[in-house]
Image: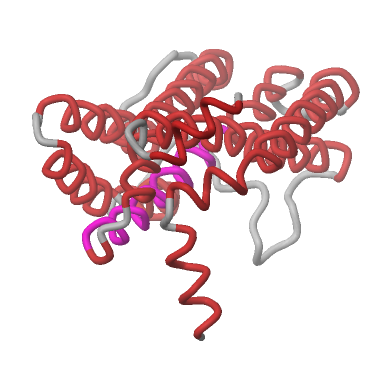
Amino acid sequence: MGRFTTWFYRMGSPRWFFDLSRPWLVGFLVAGIVLLTVGTVWGLGFAPPDYQQGDSYRIIYIHVPSAHLAEALYVAMGVAGIVVLVWRMKLADMFIAVTAPVGMAITGIALLTGAIWGRPTWGAWWVWDARTTSVLVLFFLYVGIMALRQAIPRADQAGRAAAVLAIVGTVNVPIIKYSVDWWLTLHQPASITFTAAPAMPPSMWVPLLVNFLGFYSLVAAFLVAGLRNEVLRREADAQWVRDWVGRS
């Protein structure tokens, strides 16, 4: 327990994070590019067509990872929000600030690819069912967090307000996940779960899994890079930052 507590508080130190994170950035970036290249080429070029949807289903290799990641990023912001309010860790506040625009972009990709997939499948670009509507709410939650930070002049108050919205907004995530079970929607249930065998053959779900890992790795690289820049911006007056800039 003592080691975990020490590690936890060290992770909240902007300087400690900055010193350790450069190899993470390179590793996540390389892994993300390689995995996304392999998974996308495999899924779009070599996976068999679906017996019902034909080739139109192939957008699943972009849509499903982006939709899943959009939810995961918001949950991560909610956890960071708790850390901000309880332990006042600056790095957690920085994480929310950096993650909100990335999450908004990923959610936008999920909405766009969903609309593209919906046109040949449902005959419409958009339907106001529970899943699409709740994902749209998620998009506006990301926008709301960014707007709060811009609207409140004092940085500490802006950080706390964004943390509260991040925590409250996590209520929407289980609504997104279980909307296909709770209500009648056009969306199909999940094809891959942790509790059942995949509803797809390996030639389809393996490249999807590769793209999942690729999306997560690439976005992790973006977040690490954004956090490093945010640390330098907020700690610009610290001596260690001046020393680092001087060495660079």
Q: Is residue 113 magenta?
A: no
Q: Quadrant of residue 43?
A: top right
Whether residue 235 is situated above or below residue 183 in the rendered picture: above
Q: Quadrant of residue 42?
A: top right
Q: Residue at x 44, y 23 (%)?
A: 105
Q: How is the image coloured?
A: secondary structure
Q: Residue at x 43, y 32 (%)?
A: 232
40 left or right of 176? right
Q: Is 60 in front, or is 148? A: 148
Whether residue 157 is situated above or below residue 36 in the rendered picture: below
Number of numbered discs visible in the structure rendering:
0
Whether residue 46 is situated above or below residue 218 in the rendered picture: above
10 left or right of 139? right
Residue at the bottom extreme of this rendering = 1
Query: How far from the left and from the top, in percent, is residue 214?
Result: 71, 35
Q: Quadrant of residue 147?
A: top left
| Quadrant, the C terminus | top right
Dominant SS of magenta comes to: helix
Query: How far from the left and from the top, in percent, is residue 101?
Result: 38, 26
Q: Is 69 in front, or is 181? A: 69
Query: How far from the left and from the top, in percent, is residue 242?
Result: 44, 31
Span shown in magenta:
66-85
Query: How far from the left and from the top, in percent, is residue 137?
Result: 28, 34
Q: Is 216 in front, or is 108? A: 216
213 left or right of 109? right
Q: Residue at x 51, y 26 (%)?
A: 245
